[in-house]
Amino acid sequence: MSSETVTKTKSKIKTRDMAYIGLFAVLIAICAWISIPTTIPFTLQVLGVALAVGMLGGRRGTVAVLVYILLGAVGVPVFAGFKGGIGALLGNTGGYIIGFICMALVMWAMEKIPGNRTVILFISMIAGLLVDYVFGTAWFMVAYAKNVGAVGLGAALGWCVIPYIIPDVIKLIVAMILSRNVGKYIVRD
């Protein structure tokens, strides 16, 4: 193979990867815009993050999540309620958004576990979601205490986690099904 062919092949792979990453960063933003406003908005972001990693794989999916968060950080209104900017990330609920990186990293780390791919994918989604809950809730408690006043763990879980468990598990089931049935058409590394 000539060096020109290798360069073209690497270039195509990088271009394809960038296209997939951009597409899934936009998908996560669209999922954020589908929102029911509450203390922590009910959105489809968890679905978008799980789809990104489930369909693209750990490396590209994590980069898509990172691109989504960076777009929001610089002010592009990609977060729930069409919000953007560093203030949205530093606010009470910003930890759940930043926690999506942790979720993607956990899913990526579990990709190489041997066994039934569908079962491993679902377990990785659940583990990633739990990490997001822990990170986001800790962030919420610190930010809320700074902005409003101290809040107990029970109250924080009651506001920020418990009402979202069943909807989030349903989103993960949908993401798993779509990742297995549609994801096979996406070119993986």
Image: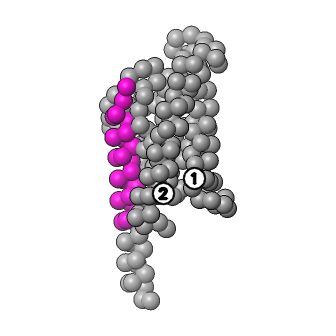
| Res. 143 visible in picture | no
Type of residue at label 1?
Leu
Q: Position of residue 54 (x, y in %)?
A: 50, 53
**Which quadrant is home to the N terminus?**
bottom left
Type of residue at label 2?
Arg
> What residue is rendered at 50% in x and 44% in y?
173
Disc 2 to disc 1: CB gap under 8 Å? yes
Majority secondary structure in the magenta region: helix
> Which element type, helix, strand or loop, lies under badge 1?
helix
Magenta highlight range: 15-36
> What residue is rendered at 44% in x and 58% in y?
181
Residue 174 forms part of the magenta stretch: no
> What residue is rendered at 51% in x and 58% in y?
57
Whether residue 183 is situated above or below residue 170 in the rendered picture: below
Q: Which mark is residue 63?
A: none
Residue 23 forms part of the magenta stretch: yes
> What residue is rendered at 57% in x and 55% in y?
118
> Which element type, helix, strand or loop, lies under badge 2?
helix
Q: Position of residue 128 (x, y in %)?
A: 59, 43
* Residue placed under numbered mark 2 in the picture: 180
Total count of labels: 2
Picture quadrant of residue 139 = top right
* Residue placed under numbered mark 1 in the picture: 121
Which residue is farthest right? 114
Gap between marks 2 and 1 measured at Cα: 9 Å
Whether residue 10 is situated above or below residue 58 in the rendered picture: below
Q: Dot 1: few (<14), some (14–19), or many (≥20) neighbours within 10 Å?
A: many
- For the residue pair 110 and 6, the one nearer the viewer reads as 110
Whether residue 101 is situated above or below residue 135 in the rendered picture: below
Q: Is residue 187 left or right of residue 139?
A: left
Picture quadrant of residue 29 = top left
Q: Is residue 45 left or right of residue 26?
A: right
